[in-house]
Image (cartoon, grey):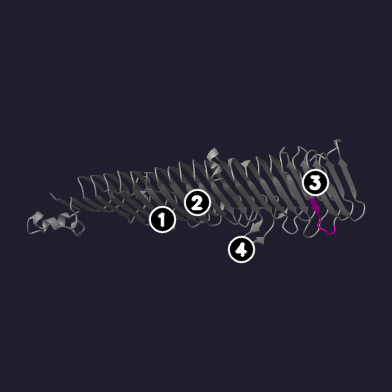
Amino acid sequence: MKKIILSGVSMAALSLATAPLFAQATEPAACNTVAGNCSIVDQNGDNNTADVDQDGDDNVSDIDQDSLGALADVTQDGDGNISNVTQLDANASTGSVGLVGDPEAIVAQNGNSNDSVVNQTIDANSGFNQLAEVEQNNDGNVSQVDQTSTGGGFSGTLRAFVTQNGTSNSTVSQLGFDGGKNIRADVNQTDSISNVQQIASQSGNANPNVRVTVDQTGGATSDVFQTATGDGADDVFADIDQDGISTSTVTQDALGLNDGGLSASVDQTGNGHDSDVTQSGTLQVATVDQTSSDNASIVEQTGSTGNNNADVNQDGTGGFADIFQTGTSGDNTATITQEATATAAVFGTSAQVFQTDATNSDADITQRGGSDNAASIAQGENVPAFAPTILGASNADADITQEGSDNEANVAQYGDLQNAQVNQTGTGNLVLTDQGGTSGADNDVFIDQIGTNDFADVTQNSSTNFANVDQAGTGLTNFATIDQGLFGGGDANTASIDQSLGGNNSSTITQNGLTAGGSNEAYSIQLGDDNVSIITQDGSSNYALVAQDDGSFSSITQNGTGNTATVQQGSTVPVQPVF
């Protein structure tokens, strides 16, 4: 039997009625199409409480409160139920300070295909502690929480707590304008979709802070958008924890004088992970942890003053990770760690770090296990579509470590005082490095390859560069080539190739590329198997040393005056330079 309950009729209206009370009651429009029970509560005044409890299917509860310190509590058991709570505090002055919730809404729905909407608004010179709590159990449920604070002097919080057990959808929108700050959202779901939007706008240096926590299990999707505006906008935080086939998107912006303090943490366990973190501001921190298979992570950080940090950890097969730090200042840090299982030989892992202004920046990629892994680091270069622009940088560090077979490492550093280190263990590995762009100087490269069928190539330009390649494989096909000073000349460069443990061996060192230079040093050490070494030096006062044993072949070409070439072939072990 359908029942309609109305609350909120004034006593004055009742005293003027000429007909029996219940004869005047008509079904509200909101209940016209309701198959179950319908409850409508309309309250005006301070400290009002509405408590609605409905059992059965297709029920409707509608609560409208315009008051200071309002409380709405709705419980619905059954399927297809609807709960609407609208709360307005249009004059939340100092009387609201200290209240746990002003207003407060509590909704509990047990069943399938239920719908909950909570709309809370503070529209006054002051307000305190908007609070919404929604719990839905079973499948097909929908929750929407809208919290808005307008007007100066807002001193409390916007807080939303949503728990959904089953396949459900949740939307949380929290907007604090002209004094908005202290925004919190907590979403806990199973096999569900969560969308959280938080915007805090604060005039002056009032430090608005925005925080969200999302905890999801099963197949889950999370989308978080956070913006803090104001001179003290320096506290934006997102924590996403997902288990199962999951997708996470986090977008954070801090706009203001201090525009910093952005933090995003994404933890994904299970299969089919996808994480995308975008941050704009300063002092950005992004941490992504992914386990199991088919992981994908993209981190983008932009800002005008640098000091950003991005850390991606992937444990499983088929990992893909990109970090883009494209601000106009340096002092950034990027770290990617990929631990692949044995079955990753089919998929491989891929990692890329891109730092536009890489001054005083660090990039570190570690890949262990599997095969066909690819790692790339680019520092000091801006690359719009198909039109690379070299910006240059100084004091940038790049470090790549790879363990496995058929791996590839690429390092490109543009500017001065750069340092690159690549360590590879396994077979069929490849290293390509390029430092200096067209005029960089004082750059260092250290390449260490342990295994067979390895290849390394180093390109450095300008002066006082240092390159060292150590290929410690005992099998076939060792090959290394170094070019120094090909653009703009250069002098005082040092190049060393060590292939002392044997192999097919081949070594080529070219310094200054027929351009004026001098005081260069080149060392090629080959102490086993079929060796070939070619060293070409330009300018004056150059030094070249070749030490070979077994197959042996050496060709040294020096142009200029005051040059020295030393070739030692045979069983005599020469004195080798130590780098």
Picture coordinates of residue 558 (x, y %)? Answer: 88, 53
Within 10 Å of the Cα at label 4, are there few (<14), some (14-19), or many (20+) other Cα atoms? few
Lower position in the chain sequence, tag 1 or tag 2: 1
Which amino acid type is shown beneath numbered disc 1? Leu
Give the quarter of the figure containing the C terminus. Answer: top right
Q: In the rendered structure, find residue 175 and report the number of the disc placed on it.
A: 1
Decide if residue 82 is on the left or right side of residue 520: left
Lower position in the chain sequence, tag 1 or tag 3: 1
Q: In the rendered structure, find residue 276 and report the number of the disc placed on it.
A: 2
For the residues bearing labels 2 and 4, Cβ distance under 8 angstroms:
no
Lower position in the chain sequence, tag 2 or tag 3: 2
For the residues bearing labels 4 and 3, Cβ distance under 8 angstroms:
no
- The boundaries of the magenta stretch are 509-516
Towards the viewer: 408 or 116: 408
Picture coordinates of residue 360 (x, y %)? Answer: 67, 50
Q: Is residue 28 magenta?
A: no
Tell me if residue 333 can be seen: no
